[in-house]
Image (cartoon, helix red, strand yellow):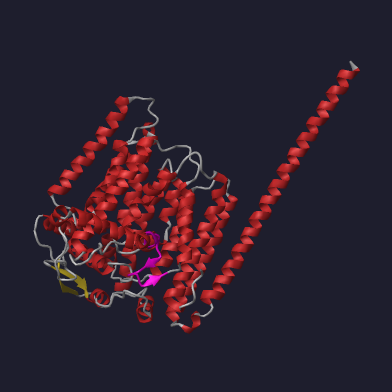
Amino acid sequence: MKHAKGAYKIEEYQDDLEYVDDHMVEKETRSGLRLLKLLINVLIIFIIIYLYNRYISSVDQLPQSVGNIIYFIFIISSIYLITATNYLLQSEKYKLEKLFLIVMVPVSISYSLIMIPGMVPDEATHMRLTYSLASQIMGVEQDKITLRGEEKYIYDRLPTAPNMDSYDYSYSHFFSGEDNGEYVTIDADSANWKQIFGYFPAVIGVIFSRIMHFGATPTIYIARLCNLFFYLWLTYFAIKKIPIGKQLMFMIAILPMCSQQMMSLSYDAVLNASTFFCLAFGLFFVYNSEDVKFDEYIKYLFSAILILSIKSSIYSFILLIPLLSKFKNLDNNIKIERKQKVILLLSISIFILVLNFVSFGSNVAKETAETAATTKNIISWSGTEGYTIGWLITHPIQGIALFMKTINIKGEWYYYSCLGQDLSWFTVKLPLEIFKIWGLLLLVCALKKEDNQLDKRMRVLFIMINLIIFFLVLLSMCIYWTPLTFDYIEGVQGRYFIPIVFTILIVINNNKINIKENMYRYINVFACLLTVITIMNLIGVCFTNSIAIG
């Protein structure tokens, strides 16, 4: 009996020791984590000081308006970096969609201030169409594009490269009131009202600014801001809802190229946001079909209309994802799966028929279609004969060689410019080393360990969608922009592939090679730091001509 009591006491003592050991280990672990968080914050502060000395300390030599904006960009970037870092380190379960807002609001403002109106590719065209649509709605335009006098003044002087005079004018008129509100016409035909789908956020901004009698410069920025709100709104819910590849979607959405395009007058902001949204909700239908609500179908179909009405509907193949994938959580209830797919298929088909009936496609789409039916195609920018569908059909070997040589010559540039190495009209070139890191981050995010997995059917579907869209992008510019004398396709830009970056990379996600969840807290801290480093390099290239970080 005494022996039993002694054994019990020994066992109880051992349990107490184990409890104390576990408690001490837990305490030491927490202390270690607190120390790590402190070290990371100290490191961030030292990096901010280094960036200031490297890029900001010499801005006093610039015009005062330019220097003030650079200081403003540095301050909001520093505050954002510290805020995002502590949100990631302090939150037990941080939300990527919330982190996306913390990152993109200051980053987008910074990009928009550096890439002033005109510096974003094709922004003059987008400005012309946006303002034309706004003028038509306001009833001040007939057959020719109509602008306010001061809007025409800015339109005629839009820069395509960093220019100190343009920066000074833009910043010094940032809060200006209406100076010349008299409407004048320019020698260009009015925009087709059916193009409203790609421009409606910016059009709302222009109309609001004109009603409030804001000056021409704040009008452009308010229109840009409306595009930004739309991008943030759709992309926020895309990141929140997507059931697989959430980390990858977040990283794509904060790429430098997306940051440039989302707060500009370009319809890329609408297109990219709609594509992300349809990708996310399409996959949500596949993996969480029992949880789908009616209003989510409506939101999905709204975004589908935008995809169908922009860029000749090239990216509409993304809408096939929920139609051709096998739904995952219906317990083999084929009737429910078929019902949901029929609803989606009929809805999308009706929209396609309606859009085709009223010709909602862009002028580029119409010209490309007309070119396909003709024997001669004159390229607008060169005035020489270009490729046609007929030529490609009758010269299949040369056609294949044309596409292969294009990939060989331009493939690497497509990749880096898609990430954002060449910004503006390719006049702002950032260090290659930065975008090697951005590419590595995308790869790391694609390998994140996921609760849901892609099956072989979905991997094949993604690969086919990628190949079709890639081919159609090249084909459209082959016909619309490439002279017959060129032995490679001209006019394709890396940003055209942003809508399929997700479907390209997610196919490498697997169970054998993956990275666990706890690592991504620190990977995201690094990603936030990289956005600030990229912005400082932009300042260096555009304003101070500093040697970029490499």
Q: Residue at x 50, y 47 (%)?
A: 95
Horizontal side of residue 227 vs 73, given as left or right? left
Q: Tell me which residue sits at (34%, 69%) in the image.
A: 426
> Is residue 424 a member of the stretch shown in magenta?
yes
Q: Position of residue 107 (x, y in %)?
A: 44, 63
Q: Is residue 345 left or right of residue 54?
A: left
Q: Front-most of 151 and 432?
A: 432
Residue 243: give x, y in percent of width and height. Answer: 42, 40
Task: Look at the picture and state if 383 lies above or below 332.
Answer: below
- Relative to 22, say whether 433 is above or below: below
Task: Give the total of numbered labels.
Answer: 0
For residue 162: magenta?
A: no
Q: Name the spot of residue 306 as percent of width and height, x first.
A: 26, 51
Along the line of sight, the residue nearer the viewer: 465 or 140: 465
Give me the residue at 50% from left, 61% from top: 530
Quadrant of the snapshot with the N terminus: top right
Residue sitting farthest toward the bottom? 61
Q: In which quarter of the image is residue 137?
A: bottom left
State the image quarter where residue 18 is shown: top right
Q: Which residue is at the far top?
A: 1
- Percent of width and height locating residue 270: 30, 55
Nearer to us in this view, 240 or 201: 240
Q: In the rendered view, would you say 433 is above or below 313?
A: below
User: Which residue range is magenta in the image?
Assistant: 415-429
Q: As drawn, is 136 to the left or to the right of 547?
A: left
Name the residue at 34% across, 33% down: 326
Does the image show residue 285?
Answer: no
Which residue is situated farthest in the front direction here? 397
Quarter of the figure with residue 414: bottom left
In-front residue for pair 165/519: 519
